[in-house]
Image (tube, helix red, strand yellow):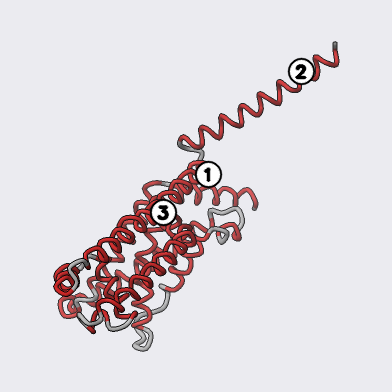
Amino acid sequence: MSASFDLWRDRFERLRTNKAFELTVITIIVVSALLIGAKTYEEEVSRFQAVMLWLDVAVTVFFLVEILIRMAAEKRLRDFFRKGWNIFDFIIVTASLIPMDDSEMVLLARLLRIFRVLRLVSMIPELRLLIAALFKSIPRMGYVALLMFIIFYIYGAIGSFLFASVDEQLWGNISLAMLTLFQVATFESWATAVLYPTMEHYPYAWIYFLTFIFLNAFIFLNMMIGIVLDVMQKESLAIELETGEGEAAELHGLRDDVRELRAQLSRMESLLERRS
């Protein structure tokens, strides 16, 4: 019984790691996304309602079979749930089992089926790297965001004191001033709507705006990008070490070999000392 179970598990493991199977899963995810988008054109696809329903059922069954294959490929079922992305896929697939024929649940079922598109993230390693880097960089980015808020607050207070007489809707209080500065930071029509009207009353107001833009658009933005790139590099090295591929894995292997050689040399030196 155990030998038969191991045989089937090995088959499921080979199927799970098969590139053709992975491409098929990715294709079905894309098809699922297209089905969801097509359902927003209710008048155009009303004549194909039965076909759309059968396709949705087929996609749901495929995802269910695919997740069961991945679970069966594990030596122990709990090993499957030790990975966050597996839990994510399991929740998405389980939520997709809500039927769409009930009028009270149809909206919830459609919303949950939208999230099946996110399974592309769990299937493509490069996307997983980006998402992992994003979440791990958030704590460090929070300090930069806090510093940006302080700068916004200071410049907003200064702007409300200096330019309130120019336009009450833009500089009437500190909250309005900070919203105006946010528009300036996004470069959305800021020159014609904010800069030039202010300079008509205060010719040297450009110093205020240019220093603010320099701090936010150049310094803080580059700090954010630097944090994300640093985390992505660390995540990439971690993946290379985990998979045993890439320069990081080769360097790690060389370090292990050097440690083994040092250990052998130490043993040989100790033997020579004993004989002498």
The quarter of the displayed image where residue 42 is located: bottom left
Asked if residue 25 is positioned above or below residue 190 in the image, the reply reads above
Does label 2 or label 3 sit earlier along the sequence?
Answer: 3
**How many residues crowd mark 1 within 10 Å: few (<14), some (14–19), many (20+)?**
few
Closest to the observer, 62 or 149: 149
Residue at position x 39%, y 58% from top?
Answer: 121
Q: Which mark is residue 242?
A: 1
Label 2 element class: helix
Does label 1 or label 2 sit earlier along the sequence?
Answer: 1
Label 3 element class: helix
Give the labeled residue for mark 2: 269
Q: Residue furthest top?
A: 276
Instruction: Tell me which amino acid carries mark 2.
Output: Glu
**How many residues crowd mark 2 within 10 Å: few (<14), some (14–19), many (20+)?**
few
Instruction: Tell me which amino acid carries mark 1.
Output: Glu
The quarter of the displayed image where residue 271 is located: top right
Does label 3 or label 1 sit earlier along the sequence?
Answer: 3
* Quadrant assignment for the C terminus: top right
Residue 34 image position (x, y, % from top left): 26, 66
Is 186 left or right of 93, judged from the image as shown?
left
Residue at mark 1 to residue at mark 2: CA–CA distance: 35 Å
**How many residues crowd mark 3 within 10 Å: few (<14), some (14–19), many (20+)?**
many
Is 249 left or right of 180, judged from the image as shown?
right
Residue 258 image position (x, y, % from top left): 62, 26
Asked if residue 53 is positioned above or below residue 15 in the image, the reply reads below
Residue at mark 3 to residue at mark 1: CA–CA distance: 21 Å
Residue at position x 32%, y 75% from top?
Answer: 178
